[in-house]
Image (tube, helix red, strand yellow):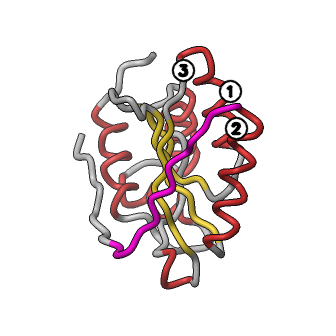
Amino acid sequence: MTAIDETDKRILNTIQIDFPIDARPYRVLAEKLGLTEETLMDRIRSIRQNALIRRIGGNFSPDRLGYYSTLCAASVTQKKIDLFTQTVNAYPGVTHNYMRDHTFNIWFTFIAPSRKLIQAHLDDISEKTGVSPILNLPATQVFKISAHFTL
């Protein structure tokens, strides 16, 4: 992995909280950061290739869009972790997927247009991976916090 320099830190700090809504957002960001658009794009590609970030995208409030969200947890053996996480990540409604040091060691969030569809997907994941049960802990009240990691 390449070392992160001050310019990369400025880029990461900026895109977390101030990503412009514009036809050419990277040009706007580049101007703000004193870089060329090409340099900014090269640095972001490098940051992604070095696994410092995995995606750049908007965050939406599921309930305000008529969607439902749930937190899921499963107890997955070491032997099945790759299969399970790859299967879970194949669903477009999965927004986070991470390991915890707990009996239920894989946790992920799922967003879909209905609770019934979420459950159908969880049943499908369980069938494909042999992991059961998958806890389905639907949100009853949504609390949004800003997750900004200052570098």
Give the image location of residue 64, x and y in percent. Answer: 49, 85
| Nearer the camera: disc 2 or disc 3 | 3
Q: Are marks 2 and 1 in contact (CB under 8 Å)?
A: yes
Earlier-in-chain disc, 2 versus 3: 3
The residue carrying mark 1 is 83
Front tag of 3 and 1: 3
Instruction: Indicate whether 49 appears above or below 151.
Output: above
Q: Residue at x 50, y 49 (%)?
A: 135
Q: Secondary structure at mark 1?
A: helix
Q: Position of residue 139 (x, y in %)?
A: 41, 68
As measured in the structure, the alpha-carbon distance from the residue carrying label 2 to the one carrying label 1 is 6 Å
- Callout 1, which amino acid? Leu
Residue at screen point 58% across, 24% down: 81
Q: In terms of secondary structure, where does tag 3 sit?
A: loop
Q: Is residue 60 above or below residue 136?
A: below
Residue type of the residue flagged with mark 3: Thr
- For residue 12, the mark is none
Three-letter code for the amino acid on which mark 2 is drawn: Thr
> From what the image shows, is residue 99 above or below residue 32?
above
Q: Residue 103 vs residue 125: left or right?
A: left
Separation of residues labelled 2 and 3 (CA atoms): 15 Å
Give the residue at the far front of this rendering. 133
Tell whether position 120 is magenta: no
Q: Which mark is residue 87?
A: 2
Question: Looking at the image, is 99 positioned above or below residue 31?
Answer: above
Q: Residue at x 51, y 67 (%)?
A: 69
Which is more N-terminal, label 1 or label 3?
Answer: 3
Read off the magenta span. 130-142
Q: Which residue is mark 3?
A: 77
Asked which quadrant contains residue 38, the reply is top right
